[in-house]
Amino acid sequence: MIDIRPTLMDNIKFHFLWILLIQCVMISLPMSMSMSNLTTDQSMLLKFKNQILDLHDVLASNWSSTSSVCHWVGISCSARHGRVSILDLSEMGLKGAITPHLGNLSFLVSLNLSGNNFHGYLPKELAKLRHLELVDLSYNALNGEIPLWFGALHKVKYLILNNNTFTETIPPTLANMSNLETLDLGYNLIQGKIPYEIGDLQKLKMFREVYHLICVTVCLSLRAS
């Protein structure tokens, strides 16, 4: 009678193949998730492009689903996460509203849309960009109040909003941006006094409001008074 029971060697081979299969799955799973997330970034940017005017056809000739988003003009991706980390569309002759889709670029570190003709209010969805360190929206036609939700962006070091048409007062919530080094609100239509809370920004080195350049010592004196 033939013995069909598995030998010790068969068991070893089975366990080896099983471990190898698990390792392959563990390796491929993060890669597939990363590709899926990068596809989300690409989709959000294409929706953004479709809702603005590209007067010089810079994006129209480059931003396409047929190429990797990491190779698009104005885009850089993180080597660590493989996600879109920098969006720099400065001085590209773009016109329109800043759409909520940009709020889904969850690994964005730098957002620079300066020197264009973006108008309207800033969408609240941008408050989800918790990795941001630089926000430069200067030299546009943005209006309305400076959003309260900027205070939720604790990693931002540079908030540059000069040369727009923002109105009302400076929100005290900006004092929650504890890493802020530069705050430029110059050449807007802002009124009222500088909030006392701005003096709590220990790392602030430059603050411009209306037409005046205010050094950090002024902010610290506000806090001490």
Image (tube, rainbow, N blue to C red):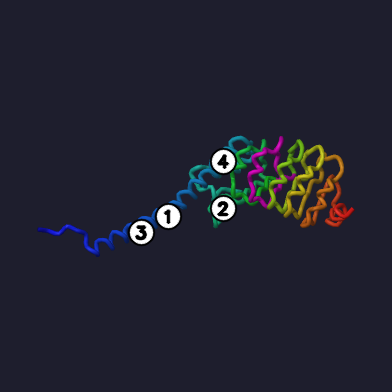
Is residue 136 on the magenta stretch? yes
Residue 141 relative to residue 26: left or right: right
Q: CA distance from mark 4 to mark 1?
A: 28 Å
Is residue 219 on the magenta stretch? no
Q: Secondary structure at mark 1?
A: helix
Q: Which residue is mark 2?
A: 77
Q: Dot 4: few (<14), some (14–19), or many (≥20) neighbours within 10 Å?
A: some
- Of labels 4 and 1, the one closer to you: 1
Q: Which residue is mark 3?
A: 19
Q: CA distance from mark 2 to mark 3?
A: 33 Å
Q: Are marks 4 and 2 in contact (CB under 8 Å)?
A: no
| Residue shown at the point (86%, 41%) measured from the top left | 192
Q: Which residue is mark 1?
A: 26
- Of labels 3 and 4, the one closer to you: 3
Q: Secondary structure at mark 4?
A: helix
Q: CA distance from mark 3 to mark 4?
A: 38 Å
Residue 93 relative to residue 196: left or right: left
| Residue shown at the point (73%, 38%) measured from the top left | 142
The residue under label 2 is which amino acid type? Answer: Cys
Sooner in the amino-acid sequence: mark 2 or mark 3: 3
Where residue 81 appears, x then y in whole percent?
54, 54
Judging depth in this view, the residue of 126 and 210 nearest the camera is 126
Where residue 224 appears, x then y in whole percent?
87, 55
Q: CA distance from mark 4 to mark 2?
A: 15 Å
* Residue 169 picture quarter: top right
Q: Which mark is residue 18?
A: none
The residue under label 1 is which amino acid type? Answer: Met
